[in-house]
Structures are given as C-alpha cells and as structure tokens.
Amino acid sequence: MANSSMANLETITTEMVKELRDTTGISIMQCRRALLEAEGDIKKALLILKKTSSEIALKKGDREVKDGAVVIKKSPDSRKAVLVSLLCETDFVSKNEDFLALLQKLADEALARGVDGIDTMRTDAKEMINPVIQKTGENIKLGEAYLVAGENLGTYVHNNKIAVVVSLRGGDESLARDVAMHIAAMKPEYLSAEDIDAETQKTMSEVFAKEMAEVKKPAEIKQKILTGKLSAYFQEKTLLSQQFIKDPALSVGELLQNRKAELLEVKSYFI
C-alpha cells in the first residue's frame, strides 16, 4: 500500500497542482489532495473540490454574517443600476480579493439578468459563493440585490459599506448623485411624510407625551410643544424634509422642486 500511495503521489506534478489552483484559487494542499483522490484526473479533481466546497458551506451555514461589502453597477446606457451586497463574518474577509471579486461577479450577473432574473439569482449564486467559503473559512451569503431603472440615476458608494441608488424624473444625473450622497450621510428612515405609518406616529406621540407629563404648563401649551417635538423628530428622519447637506438653507424637497425634479425610487444598503 505504501508503494501504491507513493506511485500516486509521484504522478501528481507541480504543474498539475498549479493548473488546478489557477483554475479554482483554492489552496495548494487542497488541490494536491483532490488530485490524489482523483488519481491525477483534473476534471475529477474539480468535481471533488466542488463537492467539498458545498459540504464546507453547509457546515458554516448557521454562523452569523454581520459584515460584508456592497457594490453598485450601472448599465452602459446608465438607465439601469444594480445594488448588490455580499455578507461575511468579519471585516477582514470583507476586504479579501476573492470576496470582492465574487461581489463584482454577482453584480455583473444581476445586471445581465435584469429585474425578472434577480429573484432566481439567490439559488444560483450558491455555486459561485461556496468556493470562496472554502478559501476564506467564513460563512458568506448573498445579501440584498436590487435593480433600479430611470432616466436620471445617481449612485454613491462609501468604503464598500454604504451604497445608495436614486432615480429621478427630471433634474440630471449630478443632482441624483447629490441626493444619493445626502442619503448616505444622513440615513433617512422615510422618503416623505406619507411614508410614516400611523402606528409609528402613535408610538412616538406617546413617548413625547410621557416626557411632557412632568412639565408644569397649561394643557394647550403642552400640546403645542408636543406637536413641535413630533414635527422636529420626523423632519430629521424624512428625506424630503431634511436640510440638504450641501446647502442647509434648502430642504431636499425644496432642492428637487427648484430643479423641477421628482423622486421616483431610492434603494440603499448600510453595512
């Protein structure tokens, strides 16, 4: 048996290991092991590595993914943009070359598939993700994948951790980008006052009412103060009401109105 194993080992050349590693990016040791199991057949070794990747990914599947990276890609005509996030366990892996290359491939895939194909991408993406799980040793999952279309698309990405796509009717791409940058900085929870649900308004009204309970003022004055507190609170959290970061004299809503632009869609992701 020892002579047979040595004979198998001798048939595995450095060139074969290098070819398999160049194809997969997986460690030399794992490539050599797969080639030994496949008795030097590179096609079989690739299948063995694929099976191993799936098994490793399955074992790590329950581990929490609380870091990652996000990217935006535009179509050549700038009429479509995809926002794709990829999640991992640590910031270290989020900066790994293989991880970032995978994120770019997933974004390309999402852009090529279009809005109808993005929903099916999550299942198909697993085969692309599993080898990178094997390389990095961390659980990796596809996060969000959005496609936004429009005549004026603005995008903004900060440190691969924050990404925003804004679609406008009217205005121009530069304005849309300014609004995207504002959203990245100010992180509004709502686009307009109409987006604030009644339950949230009721909850915050109760919170501020408790704060006002100890204030010794007439009821009508307390009600005015309460109304003012609620208005200020939601103004800070609503995009169109926020002061525009590049010109605080204007709200974002006033900026858009002045430029004859209408907000059509916003997609954002914060890691």
Image: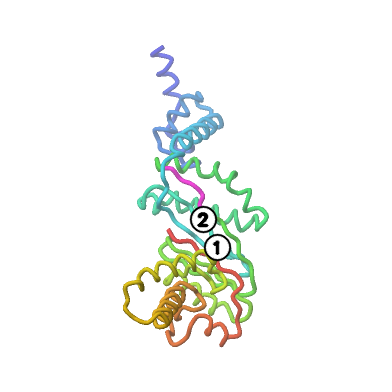
Q: Residue furthest top?
A: 1
Q: Is residue 190 magenta?
A: no
Frontmost residue, 238 versus 215: 215
Q: Position of residue 246 (x, y in %)?
A: 43, 82
Quadrant assignment for the N terminus = top left
User: What amino acid type is highlighted by mark number 1?
Assistant: Lys
**Residue 31, numbered circle:** none
Residue at (54, 79) in percent of width and height: 175
Q: Are marks 2 and 1 in contact (CB under 8 Å)?
A: yes
Q: Position of residue 66 (x, y in %)?
A: 40, 51
Residue at (48, 40) in percent of width and height: 131
Q: Residue furthest right?
A: 116
Mark 2, residue position: 104
Q: Earlier in the sequence, mark 2 or mark 1?
A: 1
Q: Main secondary structure of the magenta part?
A: strand
Q: Position of residue 266 (x, y in %)?
A: 56, 68
Q: Does residue 110 appear to the left or right of 2 in the view shown?
A: right
Residue at (34, 81) in percent of width and height: 217
Q: Residue furthest front?
A: 218
- Dot 2 falls on a residue whose secondary structure is helix
Q: Which contiguous range is marked in magenta?
A: 139-143
Q: Give the quadrant of residue 133.
A: top left
Mark 1, residue position: 73
Residue at (45, 27) in percent of width and height: 12
Q: Position of residue 200 (x, y in %)?
A: 49, 65
CA distance for labels 2 and 1: 9 Å
Frontmost residue, 190 versus 110: 190
Q: Residues within 10 Å of mark 2 (few under 14, many from 20)?
A: some
